[in-house]
Image (cartoon, rainbow, N blue to C red):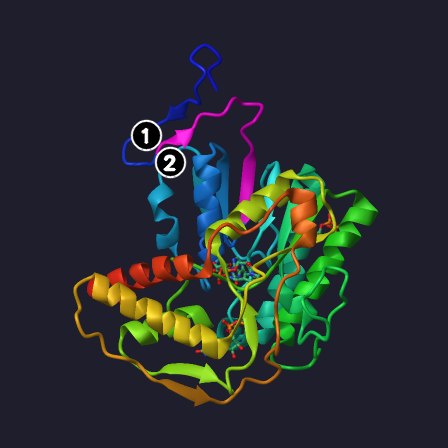
Amino acid sequence: YDKDTNRIQYTTFAKFPSVRLLPDAQRKRILVTGGAGFVGSHLVDRLMLLGHEVTVLDNFFTGSRTTVSHWVGHPNFEMVRHDVVEPFMIEVDQIYHLACPASPPHYQYNAVKTIKTSFMGTLNMLGLAKRTKARFLITSTSEVYGDPEEHPQREDYWGHVNCIGPRACYDEGKRVAETLTYGYMRQDGVDVRVARIFNTFGPRMNPYDGRVVSNFIIQALKGEDMTVYGDGQQTRSFQYIHDLVDGLILLMNGEETRPVNIGSSHEFTILEFAEAVRDIVEEVQRAEGEPNPKSVGIVHKDMPTDDPQRRRADTTRAKETIEWQPRWGVRDGVREMVLYYKQMIDQGKL
Ligand code: NAD
Ligand code: UDP
Ligand code: UDP
């Protein structure tokens, strides 16, 4: 910030977006584990634009180099291929610990590895935070509430998780990761933040990761039947990625150390959501000059074991403590994502 001109200064390197020029005292060295994944790559973009020095740590299990390749070569950016299950040394001021597969097919693909990632990966990153005195934020999940008996879910609800079911590797993994996080806070004074993220969607979501938003949009764009599991009366509340990134950065830089829900309180049944996606895809196809888009059908498939019946975030704590609330409507977000996947399909990438 230049007091004489009353303007924020930016610095530009050839081929890169301009990033804010921060004075040394404000520029932070930030580690983002899982930074090549869907959420991580959007967080990295924002932290880079804000002018920080960002190191991405990722083993590329579900993420991809291409999500952050636009920063490779920038002097404020570094990408390291590393598995968080192994110790890692670096000097940093803040750690956003995201590394963990997030979609049910991916986290169930190798359940033991998922638990190791949550437990040993979080242990290592907390050890790193303890040694460097970095502030540590973990992306936990609404899955810690399991198939909830309280609705909507508040942070003081203890949850209802089946500890031996197919989702347990993820749910219990995140629960123990939270336990570790508060253990390090109490025992070693590590400065911690815990975000409990509810279903999030947006561009760069891996199109093959099997989550409902990507499945429905791709099926509708390709004119295939949309696959609704069970009768479709189970509910979810979907937030758009930019809202989540706002929330993570506010939480990291705020004072709240208790868990904070970051998610939408706009609840859809999965069947309603399928219909909404179908309408938006048709609207986009008409707007792009396809006069008679194929109307897609809905087929029902088996309900996965332990699929939570209802889920909606109570975000009172986020509002009160970090002044966060979602700004994107679900339909606007879905439209952005439809355009993103449509471009991939038109370019033959999908
Ligand atoms: P994602 O699968 O796109 O990203 C996860 C990233 O972590 C990938 O880049 C992957 O390669 C990396 N990774 C996985 N295991 C690793 C390991 N052992 N070592 C190093 N890197 C590893 O998922 P996402 O949607 O971006 O989720 C990011 C975080 O947010 C996760 O912690 C997830 O649990 C949490 N979360 C996401 C949602 C959501 O709806 N997207 C909801 C709740 C919580
Ligand atoms: N650790 C790490 N990077 C560091 C510091 C620690 O990966 O910069 C790992 C360390 O290898 C250990 C874990 O974090 O496995 C927990 O560290 P802590 O110091 O709490 O435990 P200790 O090493 O005493 O068991
Ligand atoms: N779902 C569905 N069809 C799909 C994929 C998912 O009906 O093609 C359902 C799934 O059973 C669940 C909801 O959509 O009830 C959200 O699933 P997702 O895997 O996206 O997230 P999570 O279950 O982890 O909330």
What residue is shown at x 61% (from left), y 79% (from top)? 309
Which residue is pictured at 80% across the width and 45% down the height?
188
- Please identify the quarter of the rendering in which residue 350 is found: bottom left
Which mark identifies residue 13? 1
Instruction: Say how many tags the image has.
Output: 2
Q: Position of residue 146 (x, y in %)?
A: 67, 73
Q: Earlier in the sequence, mark 2 or mark 1?
A: 1
The CB of the residue at mark 2 lies under 8 Å from ligand 1: no
Residue 201 vertical position relative to residue 328 in the rendered view, above or below: below
Choose between 302 and 62: the one closer to the eye: 302
Residue at 70% across / 65% down in the picture? 175
- By secondary structure, the bulk of the magenta-drawn segment is best described as loop
Three-letter amino acid code of the residue under disc 2: His
Inter-mark Cα distance, 2 to 1: 7 Å
Magenta span contains residue 20: yes
Question: Neighbour class for label 2 at 10 Å: few (<14), some, many (≥20)?
Answer: some
Q: Secondary structure at mark 1?
A: loop
Q: Is residue 210 visible?
A: no
Name the outermost residue toward the top: 4
Q: Residues within 10 Å of mark 1 (few under 14, many from 20)?
A: few
The relative height of residue 302 versus residue 63 in the rendered view (above or below) is below
Looking at the rendering, the stretch of residues picked out in magenta corresponds to 18-32
**Residue drawn where x is 47% and y is 34% of the image:** 50
Asked whether 228 or 344 is in front, the reply is 228
The amino acid type found where label 1 is placed reads Phe
Q: Where's residue 5, x and y in %?
A: 42, 13
Q: Secondary structure at mark 2?
A: loop
The residue singled out by tag 2 in the image is 74
Describe residue 274's horizontal placement relative to residue 269 as left or right: left
